[in-house]
Amino acid sequence: MNHPVLPDYENCVANLPNSILKYFGAEPAGSSSKLLDKYLKEDYKNVVLLVLDGLGCSILGWNAERMGFMRTHSVGNVNSVFPSATVAATTSLMTGLQPCEHGWLGWDVYYKDLDQVVTVYKNTIVGKKKKAADYFVAGTITPYKSIFDRLTEAGVKNYCVSPYGEEKAETFEEIIDKTKELCEQPDRKFIYAYWTSPDDIIHKYGGANEGHPKIREFIDYIQVRIEELTRDMKDTLLIVTADHGHVDTTVSQLEDYPELMDCMERLPAIEPRVATFFIKKGRKREFKKLFNDIYKGKFDLLTKEEVLEKKLFGTGTEHPKFRDMLGDYVAVAIDDVTLIHTKKVKWLAAHGGITEREMYVPVLIFKKYYLLGTDADAYVDEALKRLKKKYPWAKKSLFHKNYRYTVEDVDGKKKFIKYYDWDDGTTKRYDDDWDGELFIQEIMEDQESYITNANEVKDVFDVRPHTGVQMHGWYLERFEFRSHVLGGYSAFVQAGDRCTGGSREFFFTPEQMSGTFEEFLESNGELLSGHFGLTSDYMEKFEGLKEFLGFKE
């Protein structure tokens, strides 16, 4: 399923530049990204934001190897803005503003000053080759203060590397080479880099729903180039994201419905999957019926008032020209149809709507490749340090002795290598092109179960109802809290149906146990209270549980 996702303006691409502005001490344009803020706590000489047009989460998921260099560096995802399209989203990425604030709503925008729908980047009247004005309409009527302006005001050097930026790059290879060259310069700086693919490839071949060889080929290529960049990086944080995702789509030509077109005062504006319609006087009811007869279930047809009430274009202070850009209705794509007018387009994928494939974009974080040097012991020590934050009893003597970790010269490059020595004397060698951060994570994954298994259960507190609980055919067999010999607490859940069963144990970190009992239950609501309908109220009232877990008044 490809469910609708309403834009979340506290967790979207517009928040990312505000995190960067805040990091450099410049004035943010809005709220920052909680996700990115976590990775901007160290001191870096360079912060690079690389935007790959159209690389939504589903595109990365379908077309990149699960354990490949790109996907293993994903730290989470954020929403695109509305509409989930290049003009609106890249403007938000370059300003920190929401679409209702900057007014660059889409590919085609209606400007009341001209009483024309203008194709923004081409500066032409929609459907014609005629120039809209002898000046750049969007830049003149809806100017904005960019992230570059704000950083310059704060005295921070900044660069834009793209086919359209001051640091012009015509190929992705040039994007990487220019970025690398700028990173090597001495000053502290921000670099915004933008590349037009895979958007163009996806429009042509599809691949949002099940992948495509052409997209895989592109991702394989950029993966190599990004790895080359990170291998030589120093004092640099590289953030890779996208402006929007895609959905595989079918095209509907509006000209095929002359009665519908006849209701319109002018051609639609904004985007093919988010179209705003200006309707002739006295024809609104007719238009609504005709549109819904054709597109019901494919588009939600909203009035201008409904769009404003839902705050689809943003929650910030509206640009003075914003409301004039909206017609009487806005059609929002919720399925796989794209509306095209004035020309035949053979897109196999498109974007702009609010389906999850269009709305979710990844955030990938890359640090220095050998962030702790080339001594493998440093990475083992760091893995232990991180494990101790979750499991305070962790120590190196509890690591499984069959694992060995080294850094070796392979084909002229230093590589992180893992060995597993079997008890029969044979050895398995693993070389998965880890960088330093991934190598630490690999060590942690190897050793985590041995750390937890070493901490034997001391006491058990059963909270399963005596009457038994069933949910969706599954029977709750055990639900208990445990204290452990080496310290710490965990929860153990076991359930089964007539054919199979399963169990999981969850250890609680010291941080989770540091607040009140009520805060503990609230922070673990999804993990604990939701299981089999056992709510936080149930846990809070369960006699003796609070004392068992060591919480005091």
Image: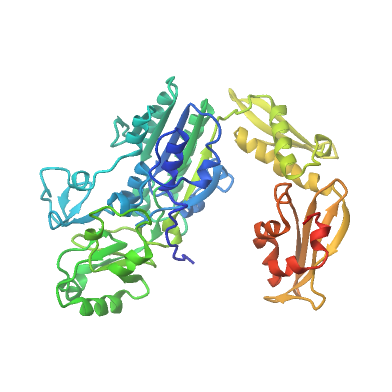
Which residue is situated farthest in the top direction here? 186
Residue 196 visible, this orientation: no
Does residue 296 appear left or right of residue 136 in this picture? right
Write down the quadrant of residue 190 in the picture: top left
**Rendering coords of residue 436 (x, y %):** 62, 32
Q: In percent of the image, x 58 and y 22: which residue is there?
A: 412
With respect to residue 552, does 185 lie above or below?
above
Q: In percent of the image, x 48 and y 46: which residue is there?
A: 33
Work out whether residue 359 or residue 419 is closer to the camera in this orientation and state it. 359
Write down the quadrant of residue 337 in the picture: bottom left
Q: In percent of the image, x 80 and y 49: which residue is there?
A: 488
Q: In percent of the image, x 44 and y 44: which residue is there?
A: 16
Does residue 549 appear left or right of residue 125 in this picture? right
Quarter in which the C terminus is drawn? bottom right
Work out whether residue 327 or residue 321 is closer to the camera in this orientation and state it. 321
Work out whether residue 177 or residue 263 is closer to the camera in this orientation and state it. 263
Does residue 141 appear left or right of residue 458 in this picture? left
**Rendering coords of residue 406 (x, y %):** 71, 29
Residue 426 visible, this orientation: yes
**Rendering coords of residue 122 (x, y %):** 19, 47
Work out whether residue 80 or residue 399 is closer to the camera in this orientation and state it. 80
**Rendering coords of residue 78 (x, y %):** 47, 51
Does residue 445 appear left or right of residue 24 in this picture? right
